[in-house]
Image: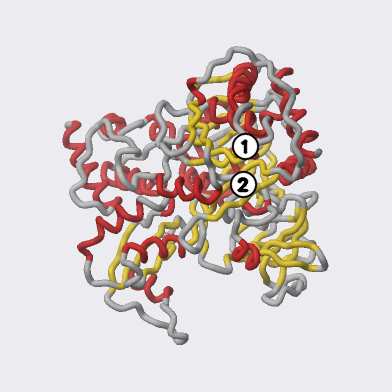
Amino acid sequence: MEKTEVLATLEKIFSEVLKCPDIKLDYSMTTKDVDGWDSITNMMIISDVEKHYGIHLKLREIIKMKNVGGLCDVIMERAE
Amino acid sequence: MEFEKNITLPLLRSLTANETNNALCIEGRFYTYRELATAIAKIRRKLHKVAETHIGLVANNDLETYASIFALWLEGKCYVPLHPGQPLQRCMDIIGQVGIHVVLDSSEATRYHEQNVMMTAQMEGDTPTMDAPKPCTDEETAYILFTSGSTGRPKGVPISRGNLAAFVDAFYQLGFRLNASDRCLQMFDLTFDLSVQSYLLPLLNGACAYTVDPEMIKYQAVFELLDEYHLTFALMVPSVIHYLRPYMDEIQVDEMRYSLFCGEALNMSDTDQWSRCVPNAEIWNVYGPTECTIYCTAYQYKRGKENKGANGIMGIGRAMSGVKTVIADDNGNICKAGEKGELCLAGNQLTQGYWKNDEKNHEAFFHIQGERYYKTGDICQMDKDGDILYAGRKDSQVKIQGYRIELSEIECVARKFYDDKRAVVALPIYDEARNCTIHLVVEDLDKGKANALTDYLKNFLPAYMMPTEIHYMEHFPLNVNNKIDRKKIALSIK
């Protein structure tokens, strides 16, 4: 799995959850940089990510993800 | 003077007796009581030549902002928090309503160009010693907080030094005790009055207050603090444990002594699960509108016993010391036990009235046998033991993550976009997990203006009031009374 692939999947998930078609993400983006990414939508995004990759993320892993890149890294670690 | 007795003197004692102890933990960095005192002293010196009483305070998450609060109180002045993340328009409205000319700002650069801005981070001073507090009566204002207003503009709630002193006394009368070894959560924006209990009580007692990084997702930031620092006292909004529910098996804070909830309905089931995460803590559900200083009723959760509640929502208990509660019907008559009515509050914590708003004061306050009561808009009933059970709202106000939102404020702003030529409704939509989001529905076929409407709303509404989705409908359905049928609209957009 390539990091770029994961980013593309995340863009799809974010687009759906945030109801914002064709969202473009980069690794450095945080909740500040993405409209509508807050507590509620974050839960929905994590849930979709877990379903898509068949993984279960622990809270301690989730809080370590400071940005989109961090989320990609955790996915790549766990989804092997 | 009660403020002097309950707040000023204990604060000054705390600042000198605990010099080397930690007072604040902000984004991983600790500040001692000496550092806090030094910052307070330098800001006080600059405030000596300021004549104004009501001072704007940019609500940043840093030492200077907290020091400013105390500096203002010691100078006999009052703070009016201005949220750095809220639209400038909204903050300027607040400045206009109060008549603010001076703003304290700890940022590097300010966005207030028409006021006298004092940049607190640039002030110099390296001594914690300061003059005696300026004499001031309990009637003077301690802070003015603005809450969502149903007419489209936020309304100001002034809380006096006397109100705040009464709250501090009532807090201790519940049996809560804090000391220098306590580590306390402060998770709230300074524009939210729950922040006041969260920063003030620890600092009056030599404890350390741990603040939450405003850039982080709240429930994650809270977990990080609880887990890393093993906090001993936490006042939280219920939605935090609601979001943490799937992860509760990872949470264990044996050191927690007090876990308080306030700001929105507390789910009984979430609390049962949470009680295992904090096995040694007293768990309390506390309630109160901003108008009655922070919180004014309290209920203690009991493990392994049946807890008071209705529809899965925990009861809000009884009046704290100095507070009076009454459940009244539409005619102002007191309801019997078990009868639902509007909860009304009186006593020492009650605000003197909304800021320069006779109309709202006339609507919201009334007298029962010479005592002044405030109509909360919360529908409740008292059980035979005198405990209050919460049943819902009387009007169109919702709470999301503890934030008070008047749906009509959102509707007012949206209608202005259309020059009042279109009808709009703002609806709270609940998902299966009971998370609430706001949806805006416009009576129009033209979806092309959606982006412009969103941008317009962003200029007036804080982020937590922004609708998550905008829908369009050709004609709003009407009910039998010829009023817009909100229930039908809600069903059709789900």
List x then y, in percent, for residue B261: 61, 46
According to the image, label 1 marks what residue? Answer: B198
Q: Nearer the viewer, residue B315 or B185?
A: B185
Tag 1's secondary structure? helix
Answer above or below: position of B137 versus B129: below
Tag 2's secondary structure? strand
Residues flagged by tags 2 and 1 on a common chain: yes
Question: Mark 2–mark 1 contact, CB under 8 Å?
Answer: no
* Image position of B196 (left or right of A77): right
Give amino acid for label 2: Phe
Q: Nearer the viewer, residue B8 or A48?
A: B8
List x then y, in percent, for residue B133: 73, 27
Q: Determine which of the numbered discs, if any, sits on residue B261 in the image.
A: 2
Q: Chain of mark 2?
A: B
Visible residue check, residue B115: yes
List x then y, in percent, for residue B334: 76, 72
Q: Identify the image quadrant of the N terminus of chain A.
A: top left
Q: Residues within 10 Å of mark 1 (few under 14, many from 20)?
A: many
Q: Determine which of the numbered discs, if any, sits on residue B244 in the image.
A: none
Answer above or below: position of B113 versus B467: above
* Image position of A68 (left or right of B181): left
Q: Residue at x 63, y 28 (%)?
A: B71
